[in-house]
Amino acid sequence: MKRIILFSCLCIALATVSAQDSTLARVFIKNLASKEFHGRGGAFNGDSIAASYIAEKLSLFGAKPLADDYLQHYSFRTFKMEGDFSISLAGKVLEPGVDFSVHAMSKDFHGKVDILYFDAEKITDPDAVQQFCDKNRKKLSKSFLCIDKGNEKDLSKKALRTINQLKRENIFGVAGYLIGVESISAMSIPANAQQLDHSLFFVRSEMLAKQPKTAEIKYDSKLVIHRTQNVVAYVPGTERPDSMIVFMAHYDHVGQVGTVVYPGAHDNASGTAAVMDMARHFAHHPAKYTTVFLFFSGEESGLMGSKYFSEHPLIDLYNVKMMVNIDLFCGGDDGIIVFNAEADDTKALFEKMKQVNEKHGYVKDIEPRKNSANSDHYYFVERGCPAIFILTKGGAYGGYHSPTDTCEGCAINKYNDVWNLIMETLGL
Ligand SMILES: [Zn+2]
């Protein structure tokens, strides 16, 4: 009798066990965020390494390819920084990615240079700038100019704006700039941008406190046409194969600058892992609708992959019932944000999501937001497709576009809850 009770308990438990596999998702995140994937950007073709990995898993699960080898190829122009990336100030070697970073469009530089200093607040005073330039006329073109923003709160908005302008315009006519910052901020590498004719590095203010007089800088950057690919798969529906539910996530991240890898565990190995897990689940348990799984590259360079797919769709966009974009899927202790939640073709779904959550209490809060060009759903919304973008809020993750966004820093304790919320809302 005891045995029978135990057996039936087990059956009930199995029947209610969710279809997702958070342990497997954790393995995917760990692999995608590992050094071997070079931050999944253009550098060392890290994105292509990640694409092969995802395609291999999709094939293993039995999801069908939407293109040859699951890959939709395209290209864009971008910067690769696969060589030197070092700065020492008066002989002190700085730690790349922690003590300094570079503006993605910076010109490369190799050599020893003198450093000149200019007061950040005075940058708004044309006379002060002129006097400085007159005084240092002979040195300017061969020197780096240091402008320390320090704690930005102490600076006027006008001064900050003018310092920002140095990212486009070489106001002082120097070889390069060292911009002092309180901490190193997020790194992004744009597509289809031009290289500057001057160098521009960000250095932690603390490193500049003693006003070192010389710097030794080694930095390589190349503007290249980068060949990349989206990874695309589907599972035919059992009852209404013409209707499609599309899950998407960008698998690319910032990549690598010199030896500094941007692991991008939260952004967006986490969302990629979730969509891979969804492909696994639906390959084994097909839904009544066709489920489509799109993994985009080039998102961090300006939504390049999803824009390309929306212009060269491998599915009939007219038959899309709903698109769900997942980008930033770690944490989630404070709930989720849903972008494009209250459009004519998504508001009913959003209402249902709130009801499902009220019933089961999966997440703490569901916050609606307007559509925004902040992730891959955007170009599909522009083309008239019903699409939402879900990201988690609160909880642990390592950082944003930073070398600290590691798998170890990435909590997925809300993974099952958010998965259940999405699937029940979609009726899957
Ligand atoms: Zn992202």
Image (cartoon, rainbow, N blue to C red):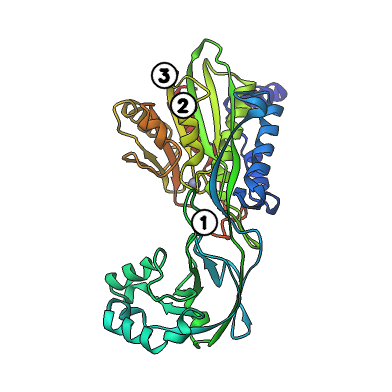
The reply to whether residue 20 is in sight is no
Q: Amino acid at mark 2?
A: Glu
Find numbered disc 3 in the image and state the secondary structure of the residue it sits on.
Answer: helix
Q: CA gap, disc 2 to disc 1?
A: 32 Å
Q: Amino acid at mark 3?
A: Tyr
Q: Which mark is residue 401?
A: 1
Q: Does 360 sit above or below residue 304?
A: above
The reply to whether residue 251 is in sight is yes
The answer to which of marks 3 and 1 sits earlier in the sequence is 3
Q: Which mark is residue 416?
A: none
Q: Does 94 sit above or below residue 104?
A: below
The image quadrant of residue 251 is top right
Q: Position of residue 426 (x, y in %)?
A: 44, 25
Could you tell me how many numbered marks the image carries? 3
Q: Position of residue 350 (x, y in %)?
A: 35, 31
Q: Amino acid at mark 1?
A: His
The answer to which of marks 2 and 1 sits earlier in the sequence is 1
Q: CA gap, disc 3 to disc 2?
A: 24 Å
Find numbered disc 1 in the image and state the secondary structure of the residue it sits on.
Answer: loop
Q: Which residue lies at the image location 61% right of the left edge and 64% below the top edge?
A: 220
Q: Position of residue 87 (x, y in %)?
A: 60, 75
Tell me the crowding category of disc 2: few under 14, some 14 to 19, or many 20 or more residues within 10 angstroms, Cα based: some
Q: Does 55 sit above or below residue 15?
A: below
Q: Which residue lies at the image location 45% right of the left edge and 81% below the top edge?
A: 140
Q: Does 83 sit above or below residue 120?
A: above
Q: Position of residue 418 (x, y in %)?
A: 49, 37
In the rendered structure, the answer to whether residue 209 lies left or right of residue 228 reads left
| Residue corresponding to mark 3 | 318
Label 2–label 1 contact, CB within 8 A: no
Label 3–label 1 contact, CB within 8 A: no
| Residue corresponding to mark 2 | 424
The image quadrant of residue 88 is bottom right
